[in-house]
Amino acid sequence: MNTDIPQPFFDGHNDLLLNLWLHHGDDPAEAFYAGLVGQLDYPRMRRGGFAGGLFAVFVPPAAYLTNMRLRGSIRDETDCAPLAISAAQIEILHTLAQDSQGRARICRSVDDIEYCLRNNVLAMVLHLEGAQSLDTDLLLLDQFYQQGLRSIGPFWNEQNQFGSGVKGDFPGSPDTGPGMTPAGKALIEVCNQKRILIDLSHMNEKAFWQMAELSDAPLVATHSNAHTICPQPRNLTDMQLAAIAASDGLVGVNFGTAFLRGDGKHDGGTPITDIVKHLCYLIDRIGEDRVGFGSDFDGVNVPDALGDVAGMPRLLEAMTRAGINDALREKLAWRNWLRVLMRTWGG
Ligand code: ZN
């Protein structure tokens, strides 16, 4: 094996757009292609093998926005209404594609992603993390879809018009709230019709089971881990994993140390092998075709030994040392993600 060439991988979740919106709203493409503070930018993505992924549009909670404004990360004149933030981040993603000189594209289908993988073009899929910018009549959903939206997490940790997310202290169960509202259930139905992926990662347990009953698509958690290893409310219980397996869905493993460790701590000293532990546990539980990566880069503290996206070859080496062979490594790195996206979106 030529170790100079990184294993290409597709990733279930990152918060690059939030970083660009907060710090580089005027020149996002210039900053992204030259290099950024954070865990992701184009040069390091290339070095790490990042071939594509779901790019989250994220509207932070009001308290977070106030804090960022106080710290000067958000200018006073910035419009912080949810729709304005979503629109600005969607525009940033389009700018990254338009100003890429052929290096990146917004992908709307598995065909688009496969084209990118063959041609060494960064494959960017538009994901909405928290749908509070959508109206409950879902009139805006078509507009977002036209702009490339292919994946939605209806709510983040907070409550919105579609339901309430998983919010609770470590250690704790994911059973933290009342689940989806009628508008949330209507959103699931429309997303099924339009074949938009619904992300379970921030759903509390009630919402998860409502979704399992309602949705006819594979159940996908884009960036969550195993609750048995790390009992953090955002992680998935064995019962939830069984439902994901039964639906032939997928779990993208989150690299955040607080989602990995048995003690739930944010600790940079967490070994990279803790990521491998979750991968292996999930493979045992839901099968080797249903596990992938969901790094959460730019959204969490990852092990120092990984560092940032450029450290991905070290994770892949750790997987090999744990006995993961080349064929399985490819499945975890990208094949499983493409399989579940094909089942969700269609050909
Ligand atoms: Zn998230």
Image: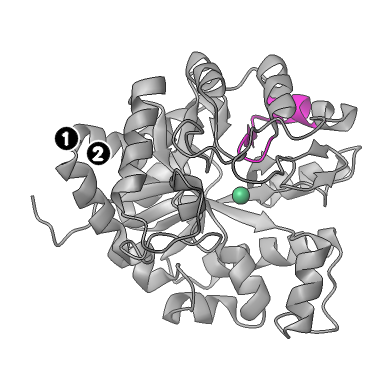
Q: Give percent across and percent down for residue 347.
A: 50, 28
Q: Are marks 1 and 2 in contact (CB under 8 Å)?
A: yes
List the residue tagged with mark 1.
Answer: 325
Disc 1 is placed on an element classified as: loop
Which residue reaches farthest left? 1
Horizontal and vertical percent position of residue 62: 83, 63
Q: Horizontal placement of 135 versus 314: left or right?
A: right
Q: Amino acid at mark 1?
A: Asn
The residues colored magenta run: 187-203
**Does residue 192 show up magenta in the picture?**
yes
- Inspect this view and state whether residue 287 appears: no
Q: Nearer the viewer, residue 153 or 52?
A: 153
**How many numbered marks does the figure carry?**
2
Which residue has dot 2 on it? Answer: 329
Tell me the quarter of the picture where residue 41 sits: bottom left
Asked if one can make out residue 65 in the rendered structure from this viewpoint, the answer is: yes
**Residue at left 56%, top 44%?**
108
Q: Residue at x 78, y 82 (%)?
A: 70
Residue type indicated by callout 2: Arg
Residue at 63%, 34% (x, y): give it: 200
Identify which residue is drawn at 79% across, 43% down: 141
As displayed, is residue 1 above or below residue 192? below
Q: Is residue 257 magenta?
A: no
